[in-house]
């Protein structure tokens, strides 16, 4: 196996022989992985502690990926950048599937469907539709062009370093945003598996990422991603199949979750009118009103809070209370806001959370409701319905064009031997992605049914141990509080983040902890596989497009690869630092990356392939304009970005479109600018027009 991954065997073997060797290697790998899980399950029954199981999964999987990276090390430019252009279509499809199954898909997608219901299907429809665009509009043409990176294409097609430089900046922006989300997912999973601090988990997982991509580049990343796909798809399917069996007796959740959705809808109506739920919602309403009063009179409210906290601490000391009670009171006093501005911000955040909990179903929409509002209701309900529908369609659009333009996905089509296999890769990748995407809606419904019918109504002192365990990892992901003091958990007394829905599914289903470790290892594989591809995209863009193409065209192959490796290390550490700050939820970060990619690349790439008249100045202005409009809309309207950059101007949504779909405005602007500027600037030279003719008509028989 070391010889297979480490030498250029594929170059010496025929395509059929190379694929047969791959088949044999991955069959043995899959068998070994199954035996590994079985052995761990047996050790769990014999009393192996959960911490050891989690640590074993973490170290074994990271060690595996690092081992493949070490065996695939190379300094050959073609091997490092495009895996020697010899990856068979089916394995490239698996690698693309793993590259695509990011932390957002594996961890966040089912969670989003759990929290938002029908509207969450926009992610599945947009991402799947994006691969259709890739197959029809970009992949085969880019493969025939035959460069290493997307900025490479822009530089050659539009004739100059300025389009390459703008493409380089855009590739780094969207890839870095996406990368932060993956490393955040790595930290979350590593802390869950081992109990270590979130920040330490980030840097532990980063080691596996770096060893793989640092040593072997695209060659190592490709064979690692195939191994990661096998782990993540098995890990995703086992818990949801088990839930389906326990709830319906049918082991095919994709076929029966519609019946469970009917039961969930009936339970939603029951919970919405439950007297205990109404009581809890009323208490949160009182809390919201009290916070509103504090916000209206911040100076007096802050002084009163400090007085109460100080008096409590003094009383505890005077009555010789326990050290733990005195310490907790001291921490509560120290945690109070330092000034009126900080107090007002904290109270506003708390009020927003309380307002959500005054609504039925913990603020979640009915799962089967297509859009918010009512098309036949009051004017306000009609407006809400229209806005909800517009946002649904806008998000689908952004995810489609973003998928078709993500540099780390498009790079994978440079690794296959021919144009024909580039098309076949898209087909295989759609199949491998389908296995997960067709399952995610079922998982969301089955988990919601389990929580509504089993967890809700459980006495607080009988809640499963995993509730407290997740609360310790991060209270923002899962917390419970007995608001009405009846010792019974109500739905609105539980706060749950979408990022943990998949990870807690095995424990919710009552499966052995080894399956929880397996699911976490699958999530880790998803995050690491995408992080590998993103890191390589950024490092290659800097090392190849900036250093080699623009700074030192005479650089040797070894120095080019070395520079890419150094830059890869720097980018990885910077992304880990940003992720450690917990900037936003995974799904927003990923969606922002799609808007950035779609607005900056899709117009320039598609017009560059299908319109000979598109010019270099037009492409530069189009990319800048599209990215500028998208960034402006996102930065001025997204709450976390507004707070981070101190933006205090009023939020102004255009047509009610949420900032997560900012690319909805940037992409049309990019197209319009490229078309208009191309018409008033001199056409490209004959050589570039001949190049466009060449890439537009791939000869599938001879490619």
Image (spheres, rainbow, N blue to C red):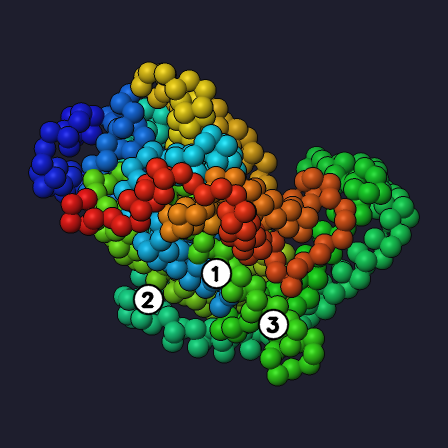
Q: Disc 3, disc 1: CB below 8 Å?
A: no
Q: Earlier in the sequence, mark 2 or mark 1?
A: 2
* Secondary structure state at the residue bearing disc 3: helix
**Residue at image mark 3:** 386
Residue 404: percent from the left, percent from the top? 40, 51
Q: Distance between the residues labelled 2 and 3?
A: 32 Å
Q: Earlier in the sequence, mark 2 or mark 3?
A: 2
Closer-to-camera residue (157/294): 157
Closer-to-camera residue (613/575): 613
**Residue at image mark 1:** 396
**Residue at image mark 2:** 253
Residue 537: percent from the left, percent from the top? 40, 34
Q: How far apart are marks 2 and 1 (CA)?
A: 25 Å
In the picture, the quarter occupied by the N terminus is top left
In the picture, the quarter occupied by the C terminus is top left
Label 3 crowd bin: few (<14), some (14–19), many (20+), radius 10 Å: some
Q: Earlier in the sequence, mark 3 or mark 1?
A: 3
Residue 546 makes an appearance in the image: yes
Q: In this view, does 124 lie above or below 541?
A: below
């Amino acid at each position: 196996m070391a010889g297979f991954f480490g030498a250029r065997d594929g170059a010496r073997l025929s395509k059929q022989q190379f694929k047969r060797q791959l088949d044999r290697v991955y069959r043995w790998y899959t068998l070994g992985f199954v035996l590994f899980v079985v052995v761990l399950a047996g050790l769990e029954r014999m009393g192996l502690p959960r911490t050891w199981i989690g640590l074993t999964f973490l170290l074994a999987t990271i060690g595996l990926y690092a081992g493949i990276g070490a065996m695939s090390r190379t300094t050959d430019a073609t091997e490092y950048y495009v895996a020697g252009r010899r990856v068979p279509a089916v394995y490239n499809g698996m690698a693309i599937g793993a590259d695509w199954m990011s932390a957002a898909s594996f961890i966040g997608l089912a969670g989003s469907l759990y929290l938002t219901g029908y509207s969450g299907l926009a992610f599945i429809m947009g991402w799947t539709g994006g691969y259709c665009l890739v197959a029809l509009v970009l992949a085969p043409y880019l493969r025939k062009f035959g460069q290493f990176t997307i900025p490479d294409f822009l530089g050659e097609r539009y004739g100059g370093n300025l389009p390459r430089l703008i493409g380089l900046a855009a590739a780094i922006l969207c890839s870095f945003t996406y990368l932060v989300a993956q490393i955040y997912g790595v930290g979350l999973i590593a802390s869950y598996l081992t109990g270590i601090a979130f920040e330490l988990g980030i840097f532990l997982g980063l080691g596996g990422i770096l060893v793989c991509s640092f040593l072997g580049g695209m060659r190592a990343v490709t064979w690692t991603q195939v191994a990661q796909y096998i782990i993540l798809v098995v890990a995703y399917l086992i818990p949801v199949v088990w839930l389906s069996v326990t709830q319906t007796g049918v082991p095919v959740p994709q076929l029966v979750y519609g019946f469970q959705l009917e039961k969930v809808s009936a339970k939603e109506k029951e919970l919405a009118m439950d007297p205990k739920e109404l009581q809890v919602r009323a208490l949160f309403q009182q809390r919201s009103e009290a916070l509103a009063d504090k916000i209206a009179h911040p100076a007096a409210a802050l002084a009163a809070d400090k007085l109460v906290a100080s008096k409590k601490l003094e009383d505890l000391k005077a009555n010789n209370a326990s050290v733990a009670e005195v310490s907790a009171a001291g921490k509560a006093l120290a945690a109070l806001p330092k000034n009126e501005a900080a107090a007002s911000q904290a109270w506003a955040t708390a009020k927003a959370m309380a307002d959500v909990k005054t609504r039925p179903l913990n603020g979640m929409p009915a799962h089967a409701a297509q859009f918010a509002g009512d098309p036949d209701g009051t004017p306000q309900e009609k407006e809400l319905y229209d806005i909800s529908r517009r946002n649904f369609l806008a998000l689908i659009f952004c995810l489609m064009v973003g998928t078709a333009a993500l540099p780390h996905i498009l790079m994978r089509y440079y690794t296959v031997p021919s144009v024909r296999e580039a098309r076949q890769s898209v087909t295989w990748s759609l199949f491998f992605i389908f296995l997960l995407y067709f399952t995610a809606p079922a998982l969301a419904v089955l988990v919601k049914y389990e929580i509504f019918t089993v967890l809700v109504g459980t006495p607080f002192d009988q809640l499963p141990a995993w509730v407290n365990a997740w609360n310790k990892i991060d209270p923002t992901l899962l917390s419970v509080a007995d608001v009405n003091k009846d010792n019974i958990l109500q739905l609105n007394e539980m706060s749950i983040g979408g990022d943990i829905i998949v990870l807690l599914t095995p424990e919710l289903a009552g499966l052995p902890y080894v399956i929880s470790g397996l699911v976490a290892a699958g999530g880790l594989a998803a995050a690491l596989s995408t992080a590998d591809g993103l890191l390589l995209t950024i490092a290659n863009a800097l090392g190849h497009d900036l250093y080699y193409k623009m700074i030192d065209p005479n650089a040797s192959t070894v120095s080019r690869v070395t520079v890419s490796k150094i830059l890869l290390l720097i980018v990885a550490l910077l992304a880990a630092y940003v992720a450690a700050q917990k900037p936003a939820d995974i799904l927003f970060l990923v969606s922002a990356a799609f808007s950035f990619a779609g607005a900056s690349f899709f117009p320039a790439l598609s017009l560059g392939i299908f319109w000979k008249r598109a010019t270099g100045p037009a492409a530069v202005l189009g990319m800048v304009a599209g990215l500028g409009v998208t960034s402006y809309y996102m930065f001025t309207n997204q709450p976390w970005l507004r707070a981070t950059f101190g933006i205090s101007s009023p939020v102004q949504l255009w047509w009610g479109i949420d900032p997560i779909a900012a690319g909805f405005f940037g992409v049309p602007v990019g197209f319009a600018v490229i078309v208009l500027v191309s018409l008033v600037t001199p056409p490209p030279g004959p050589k570039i027009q001949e190049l466009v003719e060449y890439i537009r008509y791939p000869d599938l028989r001879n490619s």
